[in-house]
Each structure stands twice: as C-alpha cells, then as structure tokens.
Image (cartoon, rainbow, N blue to C red):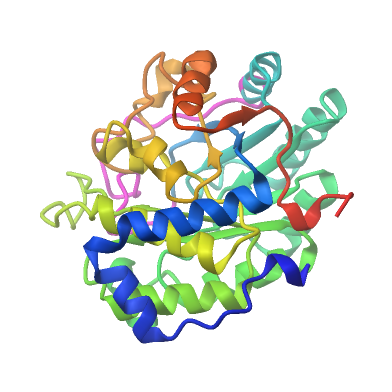
Amino acid sequence: MEKLRNTVYYSDNQLKNWIENESLNETLATKADAIRRNIYGDDVYIRGLIEFSNYCKNDCFYCGIRKSNKNVKRYRLTPKKILECTDIGYKLGFRTYVMQSGEDTYYRDDMIVKIIETVKNKHPDTAITLSMGEKSYESYKRFYEAGADRYLLREETSDREHYNKLHPSFMSFDNRRESLWQLKEIGYQVGGGFMVDSPYQSTENLIEDLRFLQELEPDMIGIGPYLTSKDTPFSNFPDGSFKKTLRLVSILRILFPYALIPATTALGTINPLGREMGLKAGANVLMPNLSPIMYRKDYQLYDNKICTGDEAAECKACLSLRVDKSGYKIVCDKGDVITRQKDF
C-alpha cells in the first residue's frame, strides 16, 4: 500500500505556487496523468447517480436546495422509484450507484436499509455509494451492515472560520469532520472534498484542505468550482476559476496517487469540455445521471447545471465516445479504489 502513497513532501510554499500559478496547468496535468496511468491505466469508472430527494434540513449559504429557498420545486423518489433507477442502470452497464440527496429526514433508517438490501440482493455484483450528509454513527453503521460500500461527505472547507462564513450557526464544523472519521472507522470507502473559490476562500484555506485530506487519507476526493445559485445569500459572488480547479485536480492526483477522483458535473457546467479536461488533469471517475428525467432540473445545487435532459446516463454510448477521444476508456465494473482490490 505504501507504494500507492506519495512519500514526497511538498511544502506549503510549493503548494501555494501550484495553486496560484496559471502557467502550470499543463505541467501539473502531465505529471498527474502519468501517475494515474501508472496505477489505473486509461480506465475511467462510471457511477450511476440517483438524486432521490432535493429536500434538505440545512441552510448552507451557497446551496440552491437550502431549506430557505422557496423557489425550489421539491421532490422525493419513492423506494420503488429508486429501485427502478437501479434496474435501469444495471441494464445500461452500471455497477456502482451513487444515492444522493439533501439531508432529508423523511427517509428513515429502515427505509434506506431496505433499499440497500434489495439492491444488493438483486444485483450482488454492484457497489452502493451513499451521499446523504451527516447522520449518526448508528445510522452509518446500519447502512454499512446492510451492504453500502462507500460514503461521500465533502467537508467543503477545513478552516473553522471559513466554515462559519459558509453555514448557519446551527451547523457544526466539528460534527462534519467527526462524521468523516466515523465513516472510516466503520469501514466505508470514504470520500471527502471541497469547493474551489468558494466565498471568502483564501489560498491558505485550500492548503488546509489538502493537509486535512492527507490526514484523512480518503478513498475518493471530489472537488469542483464554486458555482453561484441565484436563490442564495451568495448570489452576487462570482463563479470559481475553471483553470484553478483543474490545477487542484492535478495536485490531488499528485498527492493521492491511489484516489478515485471524479471529473465532476460542475466542471462540465462551467466548460462544455470540462469533464474531458478533468480526466486529462488526473481524474478517473464520471457520474452520469440515472435520476428520472422529469426531476433532474429540480436538483439544482447551482445555476445552469448540465445533465438535466436526455444527455446523461441514457447516452452512455455518446459519453464513451467522448472519453475515447480524450484518450481513455470507460470501464463497466464496481471500480474500487486500488488499495481495496482483492488482488493487491
């Protein structure tokens, strides 16, 4: 496993230069791509994203589905509809599902456990990733024991003061971080991550984010540019830098050679070729949308989100062609992080 961890120490000054120097995009991408090819080859893993609820009890100042946003058309998928999405995804070749929602208290633990168990009984060769926000240790454990494999919980920022500027007072910086450690303790493949150029963010904040991730050693790391939502307190802040986000994708690959790093929807939203460029910068995961088409436009974390129509999971052949042209190939399997694979 040590072979898959970068033992080279990069100083804060080195990281600062990489983050801020716009002339380094190509250099960093070349280095990052060589690292990912050495470990993962040209494989790109796909995850079928199921956004099953846009209700949320939280009020994050940057998020389009925050509870105070009265302009959101709210929806919830029934367990039956969620299972239909997994069946459709299986026929399309997906072997990992990402079940994502706002922090919606409607879905009791028993409901989530039943969904997980049903999917795993019907499709035992699949992996289930949950992304439902902060839960209790007991809930995390129940989901894991039911068959959930992975959990995505982006910390968004690793600086307490910055966190407090992005969230209302009832949300807890400490609880967010503790949740990540609990998920690791239970045995999940854990995913963290952060926004790039979120309001009030400094380069020093980003370096803190990288240092925290080095401490956490997550299996998955998801980042994207901050993108504005018109119905939030931050509606007047500009979108994050596309080029800086690409540099940070490359930096993550250099610091975390083994990690599963998605070329996120946010990258594709800010630039039509954003996901392809993300792959070239070191990413190796894509997450097409399996949610019912009629609801995709309502899961708007930020404005102008792509993949709200027919383009997403149903067009896997088109996506494969785009990936092939970028010099990679889509692989239809669970796509575990390399350190978790049985033959390692």
Residue in front for this viewpoint, 196 or 257: 257
Using the image, determine if residue 18 lies above or below residue 141: below
Give the residue displayed 56% in from the left and 49% down from the top: 132
Q: Where, quadrant-wise, is the C terminus in this rendering?
A: bottom right
In the figure, is residue 151 to the left or right of 101?
Answer: right
Give the residue displayed 21% in from the left and 48% down from the top: 228
In the figure, is residue 135 to the left or right of 339?
Answer: left
Q: Is residue 198 visible?
A: no
Give the residue displayed 36% in from the left and 73% down from the top: 206
Residue in front for this viewpoint, 241 or 288: 241
Start and end of the magenta stretch?
57-81
Using the image, determine if residue 312 lies above or below residue 184: above
Q: Residue 283, position in %: x, y?
A: 50, 47
In the figure, is residue 249 to the left or right of 341?
Answer: left
Give the residue displayed 41% in from the left and 13% down from the top: 310
Residue 59 highlighted magenta (yes or no): yes
Residue 243 highlighted magenta (yes or no): no
Residue in front for this viewpoint, 226 or 110: 226
Is the magenta region chiefly helix, strand or loop? Answer: loop
Q: Residue 20, position in %: x, y?
A: 25, 70
Looking at the image, the residue that sits furthest to the left is 236
Using the image, determine if residue 241 lies above or below residue 47: below
Q: Residue 258, position in %: x, y?
A: 65, 59
